[in-house]
């Protein structure tokens, strides 16, 4: 019934458009023409009026208009009766098969339809929105098949051609596999820098992936993609997040197209604000001019509060700020940006002003600094080959007032025995000190040690 109503409406619209055409391009121009003549021969208006009111004159004018209308309609009907073709591009294709039991590869997503017929029929076909293209795989078993695409014609008077008209498809049995779900946080930078996502507790830790066996074998992980934008305005505490999308990935991070059951997952997100107060440690880089040494380093910030990952904060004892003193020959003021260490999201103060003063450099020797081993392998012991290799002398350089506070207990001398095995070895001596204004150099660069099993 709806189809006939649509056809009737289209025919009605067609004849109305012809009427509008005759009125616009024939009646109105002719009327304007005669009015123009009346204006030109205004003096003879009575004569023209008499001529126009003559019955024979009106008959001839009506006859002329009727003939003109006939020829126009006739030419239009000839045009509409001519055979033509029209292409409808990118029409979606629907599929009929048991998607609970099978997976199909090679199905076309879109098709082009070429309609062939009279222009009047094509016009009517355009008014009908139904251009359904289907592939019916009912009854086909696993394997490779060539199948036809079917077009549901709206008008039987029109021929059609599909591109493509045939598809080669591969049908696989649908398999399923259980997978663990991991969480991937998106847009973490949108979260307040003082807040930290401490835990994401998923409603289900396992999901099922379904598809062809050779595709399932490519899946390395299934991730729940939690968009932090959805919780960016939250405060500390637990937040329930609904409908987190799931995606499957291979070993290279490429998305694998498989069915995931369920498609989405819920989670409880715990937001915390771990913080820690840490001292600032200013570290000079480079050497000042010869004969000078750093006397004092002062700053307007001595401590800062840092926010971030709790595990990362536990490993931090201070926040380092480096200044370049290479070739420095006079007192200098610095303005530096405090860099955030790994795992730190926010620092209470972002800049620091530092003042460095210089004085004359002096040298001093500190004796009796004991050497300690580091990174010795398990089950091994180390002994000095000679008694004089147990302790060393360290040369310290700096200003006199600073060196007067340095003794052997404030210097750390050690040898790094990583990757060393049994036997006699000559190893480098490394010295460190807690005062960054002092330069530490071991007088003995290498010592001999004996490594043996316990």
Image (cartoon, grey):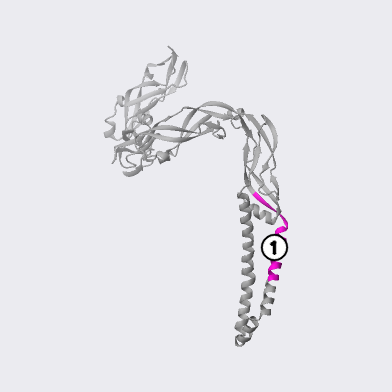
| Residue 79 appears in view | yes
The answer to whether 170 appears left or right of 370 in the picture is right
Read off the magenta span: 66-88
Say if residue 219 shows up in the picture: no
- Left or right of residue 22, residue 266 in this image: left
Q: Position of residue 22 (x, y in %)?
A: 64, 68
Q: Residue furthest top?
A: 454
User: Residue furthest toward the front?
Assistant: 55
Label 1: which residue? 76
Q: Main secondary structure of the magenta part?
A: helix
Quadrant position of residue 210: top right
Q: Position of residue 299 (x, y in %)?
A: 29, 40
52 to 196, vertically: above or below: below
Residue nearest the viewer, comparing 83 with 27: 27
Q: Relative to 388, is 135 above or below?
A: below
Residue 322 point in image, percent of width and height: 37, 38
Residue nearer the viewer, 346 or 188: 188
- Looking at the rendered structure, the secondary structure element under dot 1 is helix
Q: Relative to 39, does residue 369 appear above or below in the rendering?
A: above
* Residue 77 among magenta residues: yes
């Amino acid at each position: 019934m709806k189809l006939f109503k649509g056809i009737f409406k289209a025919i009605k619209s067609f004849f109305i458009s012809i009427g509008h055409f005759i009125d616009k391009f024939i009646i109105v121009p002719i009327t304007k023409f005669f009015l123009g003549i009346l204006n030109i021969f205004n003096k003879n208006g009575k004569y023209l009026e008499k001529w126009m009111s003559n019955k024979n004159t009106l008959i001839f004018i009506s006859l002329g208009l009727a003939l003109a209308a006939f020829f126009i309609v006739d030419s239009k009907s000839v045009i509409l009766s001519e055979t033509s073709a029209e292409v409808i591009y990118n029409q979606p294709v629907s599929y009929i098969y048991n998607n609970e039991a099978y997976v199909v590869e090679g199905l076309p997503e879109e098709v082009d339809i070429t309609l062939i017929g009279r222009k009047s029929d094509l016009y009517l076909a355009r008014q009908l929105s139904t251009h359904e293209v289907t592939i019916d795989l009912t009854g086909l078993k696993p394997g490779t098949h060539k199948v036809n695409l079917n077009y549901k014609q709206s008008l039987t008077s029109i021929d059609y051609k599909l591109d493509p008209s045939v598809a080669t498809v591969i049908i696989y049995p649908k398999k399923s596999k259980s997978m663990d779900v991991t969480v991937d946080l998106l847009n973490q930078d949108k979260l307040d820098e003082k807040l930290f996502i401490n835990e994401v507790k998923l409603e289900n830790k396992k999901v099922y992936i379904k598809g062809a066996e050779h595709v399932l074998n490519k899946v390395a992980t299934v991730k729940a993609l939690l968009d932090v934008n959805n919780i960016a305005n939250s405060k500390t505490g637990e937040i329930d997040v609904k409908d987190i999308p799931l995606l499957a990935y291979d070993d290279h991070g490429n998305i694998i197209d498989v069915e995931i059951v369920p498609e989405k997952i819920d989670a409880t997100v715990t937001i915390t604000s771990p913080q820690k107060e840490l001292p600032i440690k200013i570290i000079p880089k480079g050497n000042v001019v010869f004969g000078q040494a750093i006397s004092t380093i002062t700053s307007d910030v001595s401590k800062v509060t840092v926010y971030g990952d709790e595990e990362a904060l536990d490993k931090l004892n201070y926040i380092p700020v480096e200044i370049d003193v290479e070739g420095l020959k006079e007192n200098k003021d610095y303005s530096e940006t405090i860099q955030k260490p790994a795992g730190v999201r926010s620092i209470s103060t972002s800049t620091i002003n530092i003042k460095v003063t210089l004085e004359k450099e002096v040298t001093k020797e500190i004796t009796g600094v004991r050497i300690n081993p580091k990174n010795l392998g398990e089950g091994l012991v180390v002994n000095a080959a000679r008694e004089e290799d147990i302790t060393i002398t360290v040369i310290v350089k700096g200003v006199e007032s600073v060196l007067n506070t340095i003794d052997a207990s404030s210097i750390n001398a050690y040898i790094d025995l990583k990757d060393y095995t049994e036997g006699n070895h000559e190893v480098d001596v490394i010295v460190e000190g807690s005062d960054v204004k002092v330069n530490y150099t071991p007088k003995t660069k290498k010592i001999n040690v004996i490594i043996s099993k316990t």
